[in-house]
Amino acid sequence: MNDNATPTQRLAEKVEVSIQLDSDLLDQLRHLTNDPSRVIESAIKQWLRGERERDDELTRTFRRNPPVPPRGEWND
């Protein structure tokens, strides 16, 4: 990368990176798009900005005491 480049020029430059992905994951990406590298690049940008909220079983907060429904609304 050129150290004298303007921020706009730096954004336009692309660097090729080799990664190893599970073949099933790559198949899922290819099912969604013809350009999996764009999906991976977008996911990395979101992750770096902290925009990605995980919604899987390991990250959900457990409500220890769920609210009790008002009287007469029980499923008896």
Image (cartoon, rainbow, N blue to C red):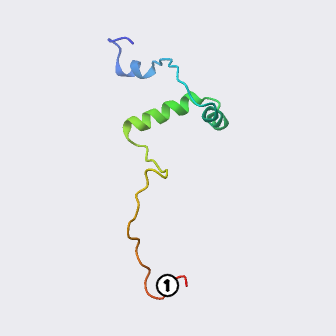
Residue 34 x/y as whole percent: 65, 30
The residue at the point 39 percent across, 22 percent down is 8
Residue 31 x/y as whole percent: 67, 37
Specify whether 48 is left or right of 22. left
Mark 1 lies on a secondary structure that is loop
Reading the image, the residue beneath label 1 is: 73
The residue at the point 49 percent across, 84 percent down is 73
Image quarter hosting the C terminus: bottom right
User: Viewer-proximal residue, 2 or 47?
Assistant: 47
The residue at the point 37 percent across, 11 percent down is 2
In this rendering, the answer to whether 2 lies above or below 11 is: above
In this rendering, the answer to whether 21 lies above or below 1 is: below
User: Viewer-proximal residue, 9 or 65?
Assistant: 65
**Which quarter of the picture shows residue 32?**
top right
Residue 23 x/y as whole percent: 63, 30
Residue 63 x/y as whole percent: 40, 64
In this rendering, the answer to whether 65 lies above or below 14 is: below
Q: Amino acid at mark 1?
A: Glu
Q: Residues within 10 Å of mark 1 (few under 14, many from 20)?
A: few
Image quarter hosting the N terminus: top left
Specify whether 23 is left or right of 67. right
The single residue placed furthest to the left in the displayed view is 4
The residue at the point 43 percent across, 33 percent down is 45
